[in-house]
Amino acid sequence: MQVLQVTPRYLPNLGGVETFVARLSELLVEKGCPVTVYSLDLDMRVAKEQSVNGVHVRRFKPLVGDPLYLPPPSFIKAIKRDRADIIHIHNAHTLLPTFVALSKKRQKLILQPHYHKFGQTRIRNFLLSLYKHSLNDLVFTRTDFVIANSPYEEKIIHEDFPNCRNVILLREALSLTELQSMKWTPKQPTRILYVGTLRKYKNVGKLLEAFAYLVKTRRKLLKLVIVGDGPERKQLESRAAKIGIQDYVDWKRNLSRQKLLKEYSEAGVFVSLSNLESFSRVIHEAILIGIPTVVRNSGATANIVEKRLAEGVDSLNPRAIAGAILRATKRSPPQVGKNQSISLSWEEYSDKILEIYRKIINKH
């Protein structure tokens, strides 16, 4: 059984989907399942074709990049010629699923949408509203299985795509043993931690404003640690200086896994204010380590608040966010009980993916 994973970007590009696809592909190879990855993230400094940890990677230069990821003719030809038994495609917010669904020959198709219902900007949201018709009529009707990452994603897939069938709920995998063995040892002054890309929809600017409010109204010393990079970095750094908190903010990026885990372990509160997630890896990592966490009380993270695993915030008003952070500092560390499973281990997850692959092959 040969598998083709298709994703807009792949390592060395960093992001939630990129990390997920790389880890899954490498585990499948370890289990004896050959995997090739097609991506549209060609950086001229990176080889067009190479083997990365046993995974055969082919990179194509898109005709149009982020956010559409319009594939070139060479990509379409490669899909038609590929001898894979299964195509497993990621990210329904790009054009890739439509082109793959229309180009595939005998291969069976699995779609993992990583779908969060809305676009990151007004323009992208408008384009998505148009593109949903293509997804519903051309993609989901040609898809053998759809994998939802969370109960919220499963719900909105059914709401938005009536032609969708064979949806499987499979919570994303985490390194459970590694995370649960971490010792949470928060440092003083209290460190408020954000981890993720620096894009507008992540609402890091709102976190800066909330932190500024805390600095001005609380005598207790605080430190804000922002780990990540992205197109808004310079703007956010300027914003921090403008509101007078530059001396209280540490900006970090390109951290090794061990250094990132150290940041987690020393944080007093973890904050993520994004509402455009199907499953947030960093939020779940923080909760499993035991860090009091603040999230939006809506979308995919509303379920976490409902389970009392995080402090919820209902608006992006700086005072509301600051209040949630203060409440989180007084909370006991979140305890994930046996009846509150929020993720699978990578071993369990990869086994379940292989079960889905075999089911498709044996069905036809």
Image (cartoon, helix red, strand yellow):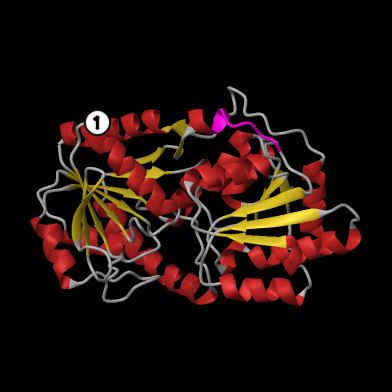
State whether residue 323 appears in this view. Answer: yes
Q: Nearer the viewer, residue 173 or 87?
A: 173
Q: In this view, does 320 lie to the left or right of 121?
A: right
Overall secondary structure of the magenta section: loop
User: Which residue: 24% across, 64% down?
Assistant: 99
Residue, disc 1:
31
Q: Which of 280 and 124 is in front in this view?
A: 280
The residues colored magenta run 179-185
Q: Which residue lies furthest to the top in this view?
A: 338
Q: Is residue 18 left or right of residue 186?
A: left
Q: Which amino acid does label 1 sit on?
A: Lys
Q: Which of 50 and 200 is in front in this view?
A: 50
Image position, residue 284 (x, y; %): 56, 41
Image position, residue 59 (x, y; %): 23, 62
User: Which quadrant of the structure image shows residue 306?
Assistant: top right
Q: Which of 358 and 72 is in front in this view?
A: 72
